[in-house]
Amino acid sequence: MDPRLKIILYGNPEEELSLLMRLSNTKQYPKNCKVISQFGDIISCRIIRKFLNKVYNSPEVKSLKAPRVIPSDDVLSEKVRRYKYKSKIQNNDNQTSKVVFGIVDFGFDFTHPDFINNGKTRFEKIWVQSEKNDGNKFGYGKYINENQLNDALDSDFPFKKIGYHPGKSDLFGTGSHGTHVLGIACGNGSVANKSFAPNSTIIAVDMGSNLVNGSNLSLGDSVKLIEGLDFILTEAGNRPVVINMSLGGHGDAHTGQTLVEQAIDNVLISRNSTAIVQSTGNYHQAKAHTYGDIKTNGKIKIPWMFKKNDRTPNEMEIWYDGEDVLSVNIYDDNGKLLLSSTPFKDEIIVKDNQEVGICLHRSNEPNTHKNQIDILINGKLNSKYWTIELIGKKVNNGRYHCYIERDDSGQSIFLPQIVNQTHTTNSICNSKYSIVVGAYDQTDDNKSILPFSSSGPTVDGRMKPEVLAPGFKIKSSCSSSSREARASNKLCSKSGSSMAAPFVASLVIKILEKEPNLNIKQIREKLFKACDPAVFAKNNLEIFRAGNGYVNPNKIIN
């Protein structure tokens, strides 16, 4: 059973749980399961807790997963700048693009001039997932439609009138992630630089912001993400659509087989005129990944370093070949043995007669067919470091990968000497057909890849990221702060692969505007042919961060 599923197995038996499921047959569903969204054999569903075990063991179920927290890409922000609005292109060319831009993010400032044409909003609809249920099919959140947004724009207090403020989660006043990304992808040039898709209709999913693992940038979860994709695609109808997602954490198997990634591939294979663009992540320097090889009866020691006085939960995932059998010994910083595990048994970790964590060990995860060890530590940790010792009980393959999950308030790390920076793409960007973007410094003549931009390949050896785009100190639309009644025509500067992905998404819109019936393979081929190759010295690991090279807008526009 999925480790997170085990954690939520016990509780109020009548509580309804939101889960993701992979079906054995796309048209056969288990009893006691309410289907909400479906993309091929992947569904989001609701199950009453008392039926969870029965559903899990149903022959119709191939894989069942609990929700997994989805953080937004962390970015480097600079001071907000205020600009006098001069209505540079207020009227644009009055020609609405036939390609819809979809975005899953948080904090969309619909009062910013970059998203208003001729006094009217360019947002067709926003689903605010964190709000109370308005009766929609998903059972949570509220829809805000175009007419409501236009009415709000005529008000002196548009955010109050509509009951939605984009700066609610902008705790530091540096501008919300969603507004900045949106300005890069499809800003009309009123304040920020004009994007390549200034006339696209916008359909947005605001996943809200939850304080999870000390992170105020954690959005919703994997279930809400899948249902957000369903919302965008349903609203888009038969129109071409490009969806941008700059989201993802450190963990999981990095083989493109999470249920989110399988759903993404199912969408892209089955629906022409559709692309999903994702950031590769900013985890190249996170010191959160290591890998190696172990032999039968071999022992590998992995030091796990904690921040001083850290009181946030910490998590390490270890993935290894399904034909191997490993066990784990866990030692504290005094060398005291906290746990000597038994393979494939779930065990409590005890320190000083107090439960401080749990070690969950699963064999043959049904999507990857790998074995998984998940070590979860609660906030009662009182150590500088632990040593995780892997022991090879039965080894044929021997390769293992370890990931420390992201924790913005108390990020733990591996001992720097054992850190490996490859295979650090974010946890949900490794599917076969999504377009994954890394970031380079556009102010540098050498176009150096930014030091934080995550590295491939995927664990199963595929190229991710696939293209590079500008990501250094990108000036774009800045949302209103929580103290402002409407946008005050500001720009803010942010750096990250989050800024590179929407740049590429806007160019994919240009491709589909010219040829709206392309399938995802054709879209990818045209985009990759429009790249200038990156050249590195032999054996330079930068090749794993470069993909097909630097996307060249002129090769697409001209």
Image (tube, rainbow, N blue to C red):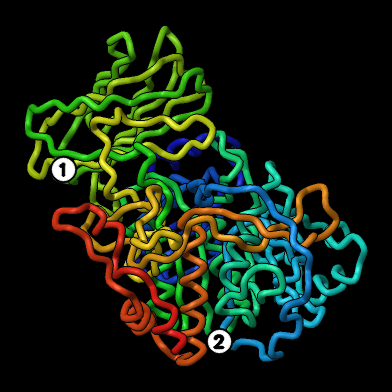
The residue depicted at 33 percent of the width and 59 percent of the height is 256
Q: Which mark is residue 399?
A: 1
**Where does label 2 land, which residue?**
238
- Mark 1 is on which residue type? Arg
**Taking the image as drawn, is residue 299 in sight?**
yes
Residue 69 in picture, x, y percent from top left:
51, 46
Question: For numbered disc 1, what is the local secondary structure?
Answer: strand
Image point (78%, 65%), residue name = 84
Label 1 crowd (10 A; few <14 / some 14-19 / many >=20): some
Residue at image point 51% right, 47% down: 74
Left or right: 41 in relation to 169:
left
Q: Position of residue 467 (x, y in %)?
A: 35, 67
Q: Position of residue 313 (x, y in %)?
A: 49, 29
Percent x, y of residue 249: 44, 47
Locate residue 288: give its quadrant. Answer: top left
Q: Nearer the viewer, residue 472 or 279?
A: 472
Element assignment for label 2: loop
Residue flagged by tag 2: what amino acid is it? Asn
Quick check: can you spot residue 132? no
Which residue is farthest right? Answer: 156
Against 179, is 175 above or below? above
